[in-house]
Image (cartoon, helix red, strand yellow):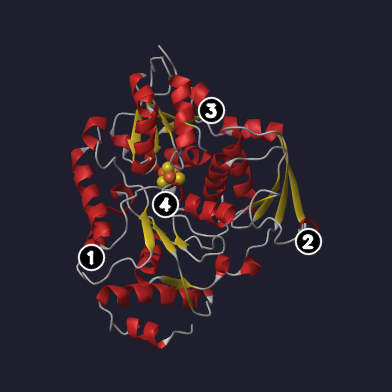
Amino acid sequence: MFLTKEEQAMCDGEYGETIRKSMDILVALGDIYGASGLVDITSAQVSGVSYKTIGEAGLEYLQDLAKDESAKASVNASLNPPGTDLDNWKELGFPEYFAIKQNEIVDAYADLGILKTCTCTPYLVGNVPRFRDHISWSESSAVAYSNSVIGARTNREGGPAALAAAIVGKTPLYGFHLEENRKANLVVNVNAKLKGADFGALGYIIGKVVGGGIPYFKMKNTPNNNDLKTLGAALASSGSVALYHVEDVTPEHDLNSEEDIEDIMFVSDKEILETRQALTTTDREIDLVCLGCPHASLEEIKQVASVVEGKTIKNKLWICTSVSVKATADRMGYTQTIESAGGNVVCDTCMVVAPIEEMGFEVIGVNSAKAANYVPSMCGLDVVYDDVENLVRFE
Ligand code: F3S
């Protein structure tokens, strides 16, 4: 891979040990994937934050990198969700040992200049790349959103590669950074009018079929940004989709003409319904309804507030979001409405990366196909998959 003189000097350790280690990662990746060189990025999003997933080894690795005080993120770089609500972990019942370790991890990232935004929806809280910007993002739903809905360019980076890119300000130029690799290879005709959790079911079906391919959706109704967020998260969890197009909706939907695409499939009402049912793993009562996967937008919090307003919730309810979105929900009175009904607006974390299996919950109600896919495997708990109105039970 071609390196400039400055990049070679970074590799040689002239800019310090952390930049040298970061360049090692980027050059190794570039060599593996045949990149022609490195390209400047405008934004990074770093996953690998929860103590549940990176453990003691990850914490030590980050603290070691952070010892080099000259190494800081050189672009707008946000952090993915950790395993606790960083401020209210005690009130919400998170284990103390876990919360202490979790804060140490987030602090090490902050020492490296990664912002404690702690969200998988950085595009809702100020990390918004422009169309065709090269970026390095690692959380799979955020990758799908930035590539597809914004039209920025990123591969599905691993956490260490995104951190290295954040520090160096560059990423290897290959894969989804190149226009020729952004064309669709499967047309999906959706013969159903979708709403709510249907979008997750559609993503779950197509992710399994397409794997790492690029689907081109033709829909009967126009999805909004929340629907696209849900769809992309599901596509990226049952498959490894990093980019999709929606006819007349997403910015690169006309990169190739529909006629160029050989593979075509149809999705019916019946398949959506069957998939919704298949994502539920139990008929037992839900003890925690956990929404906000990917992290909830203000509109989604408003919708939950309207569902629970003036009522008393029987099961526990968390809606997960970033601390920035919650601040506005507080001002608008949505948080107060949800708390008065017995629910919580939970910041930073989510049902997958939090240690909910250690907190006495057994059955989790979710409206996200990504969460329905991961909660059984990562937490060992059962899930019920449905729309918010059907998950929340009232006194
Ligand atoms: Fe985000 Fe957690 Fe879902 S990181 S996409 S809320 S699994």
Q: Nearer the viewer, residue 26 or 377?
A: 26
Residue 83: quadrant of the picture: top left
Asked whether the residues under the numbered discs 4 and 3 touch, taking CB atoms below 8 Å apart as contact, a structural biologist would say no
Q: Residue 29 at what x, y percent from top left?
A: 45, 72
Task: Give left or right: position of 374 versus 336.
Answer: right
Query: In the image, is the residue at mark 3 within 8 Å of ligand 1 by its beta carbon?
Result: no
The answer to whether mark 4 is within 8 Å of ligand 1 is: no
The quarter holding residue 311 reads: top left
Q: Which mark is residue 81?
A: none
Q: Earlier in the sequence, mark 2 or mark 4?
A: 4
Q: Circle 4 is placed at which residue position?
A: 126
How far is the residue under mark 3 from the one under mark 1? 43 Å
**Residues tagged 3 and 1 counted as in contact (Cβ below 8 A):** no
* Residue at 35% over, 32% down: 330
Q: Is residue 176 visible?
A: yes
- Ligand 1, seen in the image, is in the quarter at top left
Q: Which percent across, then down, holds residue 102?
A: 25, 48
Q: Is residue 238 left or right of residue 136?
A: right
Image side of residue 154 versus residue 340, left or right = right
Q: For the residue carrying disc 4, how many other residues have a C-alpha within 10 Å: few (<14), some (14-19), or many (20+)?
A: few
Q: Is there a contact, CB below 8 Å, between mark 4 and mark 1?
A: no
Residue 94: % across, % down: 25, 36
Q: Which mark is residue 260?
A: 2
- Which sits earlier in the primary sequence, circle 3 or circle 1? 1
Select label 4 or label 1 by which is in front. Answer: 4
Q: What's the distance in space between the residues labelled 4 and 1, CA to CA?
A: 24 Å
Secondary element at image label 2: helix
Q: Secondary structure at mark 1?
A: helix
The residue at which mark 1 appears reads as: 66
Q: Which residue is mark 3?
A: 387
Q: Which image quadrant: the C terminus? A: top left
